[in-house]
Amino acid sequence: MKMGALALVFLATTLLSEISLALSPDGVALLEVKTSLNDSKNFLSNWRDSDESPCLWTGISCSPKDQRVISINLPYMQLGGTISPSICKLSRLQRLALHQNSLHGYIPNEIAKCSELRALYLRSNYLQGGIPSNIGNLSLLNILDLSSNTLKGAIPSSLGRLTRLSHLNLSTNFLSGEIPDVGVLSKFGNKSFIGNLDLCGQQVEKPCRTSLGFPAVLPHAASDEASVPKHSSHYMKGLIIGAMCALSFAFIMLFGFLWIWLLSKKERAVKRYTEVKKQVHQEPRAKLITFHGDLPYTSCELVEKIESLDEEDIVGAGGFGTVYRMVMNDCGTFAVKKIDRTREGSDQVFERELEILGSIKHINLVNLRGYCRLPTAKLLIYDYLAMGSLDYFLHDYMAEDRKLNWIARLRIAIGSARGLAYLHHDCCPKIVHRDIKSSNILLDENLEPHVSDFGLAKLLVDEDAHVTTVVAGTFGYLAPEYLQSGRATEKSDVYSFGVLLLELVTGKRPTDPSFVKRGLNVVGWMNTLLRENRLEDVVDKRCRDAEVDTVEVIVEIAARCTDANPDERPSMQQVLQFLEQEVMSPCLSEFYESHSDKS
Ligand SMILES: Nc1ncnc2c1ncn2[C@@H]1O[C@H](COP(=O)(O)OP(=O)(O)OP(=O)(O)O)[C@@H](O)[C@H]1O
Ligand SMILES: *[C@@H]1O[C@H](CO)[C@@H](O)[C@H](O)[C@H]1NC(C)=O
Ligand SMILES: *[C@@H]1O[C@H](CO)[C@@H](O)[C@H](O)[C@H]1NC(C)=O
Ligand SMILES: *[C@@H]1O[C@H](CO)[C@@H](O)[C@H](O)[C@H]1NC(C)=O
Ligand SMILES: *[C@@H]1O[C@H](CO)[C@@H](O)[C@H](O)[C@H]1NC(C)=O
Ligand SMILES: [Mg+2]
């Protein structure tokens, strides 16, 4: 009897533990995919069957709602092997990016089961055989890039059915025969087809010989063509991929160190907050509080400098006052913001809240270094960021040598997301920014972004009077529910961040006349263009290095952030994770290296 009960308990606990530890079906499918890949550099070492969910695995993103895998992003990973048909068990997959690897074998026919697929990147591999004709079943497909492989045979006419297709690249393969002039296939020009063995048709302005009466012996699309022998560029490609890998490895190491450094920094910052140094200026006419305790000046020096600021030192003005540039005798430079309005309430409450803001430190946030109260004014002292605001850089800066190219914009997006995610998720109490816009993203010499003015709106603006006091430049960034209720939340920050992403992509202010004229804001404008499949028209013409795969990701994330329903928007942490998983690539690390060389 006792034995039986024990056995039962044992059985129940093992069953329970098995249930709670079981990997989700998507995870199991991914492990099957992994077995057919040759991951010689162990990039996929955290794909383990002991996990419950694959959502934190390298290159995987899940839908926040149901934790199903929606994206596989593994470009530049030196993966060999083949693409397993098991990939199609991921029925909710929207994005498959395996470009710039060394995959061989066929594109699995089963790909058509991923019926929600919107983007397929298989560029620069050694894939062989034909293009599976049932790719034409992927009715949501928006981007298809199969360029630089060894695909042969004809282009299946079923691709013409892909009405949503806005980007097609079949270049540099061994495709041949007539390009079907049907459906959406008619609209792509020679840039989508260059470098193939023998393609003809209207799209490449090369008539097919059949029109001259020759018998048509056109190869049929099939996926079981004989394999094509590998060519000698394989070796070169290996070399290039090797170099890429070394770069990305250096990048990962750098981030590891930064991360550890940040963690220890954070701990120290917490300690420091408890011992924030208060220096009360001797004379009664001024009060000075410094934060972080590391301003190497006496109060007298600082107050004297502040009092001597005049019109020549002004660098800008915003909703709360005027900003001055203050250069100390040792050339240390600060930005001093003279506040010209304050909320009703005691100075003590104000100063206590400021201390919280002053205790926050993160590489992607602008440090608040001090506060000074004079009989005539209240002043905030910030670190000075040499390149000014993103707003200025994006819309007013004309110098040719340092334009914001696409890679620089991606870094700004990721850095700003890091700063914001820190405010929302790592600060205690958490901080809602309330005023995210491009003029509050400041850039240092390396164009690394620092978010400024966080928490200031709450400190300075009365809750009830919000709509009338909203700073004019902020208007286009505000979430609809914030405009209505006046209640700022993390989700209203996420909305503003989405608008900021669109500003980076389009190079246009959210209040640009071109959409205001059509009665739209930037969000509505983007949605209209996307409905018309005009992804290319969205991108700022100055970003010549913009690649469709990252543009698509940013626009997609922006669309989620600007969802009209705040509950549908991702958290800043999720946004950051999306950006890191999907946009990080060796190109970014190259950018880091070339920039640190220059500076
Ligand atoms: N720490 C800083 N370093 C360098 N320049 C700064 C700094 N802070 C502000 N500026 C410059 O001063 C300008 C005005 O800043 P300010 O914050 O007053 O206005 P804003 O950002 O346009 O609006 P808001 O008042 O809503 O923040 C900025 O656009 C920027 O160019
Ligand atoms: C995997 O790739 C490495 C180097 O790229 C190679 O040496 C090894 O033989 C490959 N393994 C398999 C099983 O193909
Ligand atoms: C998918 O495509 C193939 C070939 O084009 C076709 O035979 C099949 O019916 C399609 N399946 C679905 C579900 O549409
Ligand atoms: C591709 O088309 C453009 C314009 O249609 C033309 O100028 C160009 O010469 C073409 N290129 C090739 C390689 O045919
Ligand atoms: C397709 O890819 C090739 C090389 O991979 C590139 O030169 C070409 O510009 C691309 N075409 C389009 C339409 O992007
Ligand atoms: Mg500002």
Image (tube, helix red, strand yellow):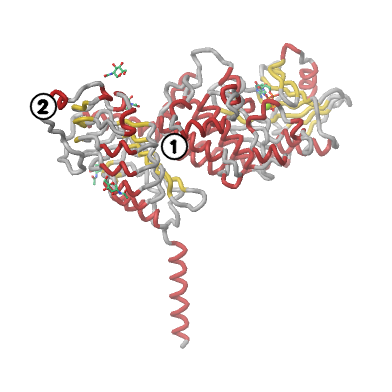
Question: Looking at the image, which residue is at 76% across and 31% down?
Answer: 468
Q: In terms of depth relative to the viewer, which is nearer, 8 or 164?
A: 164
Answer yes or no: do the residues labelled 2 and 1 have beta carbons within 8 Å?
A: no
From the top left corner, tell me how far across and down residue 343 is, in percent.
Answer: 81, 34
Q: Specify few, some or many for label 1: CA neighbours under 10 Å numbering under 14, 14-19, or 20 or more.
A: some
Name the residue carrying label 2: 214
Q: Residue furthest right?
A: 284
Question: Looking at the image, which residue is at 29% across and 33% down?
Answer: 182
Label for residue 252?
1
Q: What is the spatial separation of the Cα atoms under label 2 and label 1, in whole angstroms?
A: 58 Å
Q: Residue furthest left?
A: 215
Describe residue 453's horizontal placement relative to residue 517 as left or right: right
The part of the image, by quadrant, that contains residue 597 is: top left
Describe residue 29's horizontal placement relative to residue 554 as left or right: left
Is residue 351 in sight in this rendering?
no
- Which amino acid, by three-letter code, is at mark 1? Ile
Q: In terms of depth relative to the viewer, which is nearer, 370 or 536?
A: 536
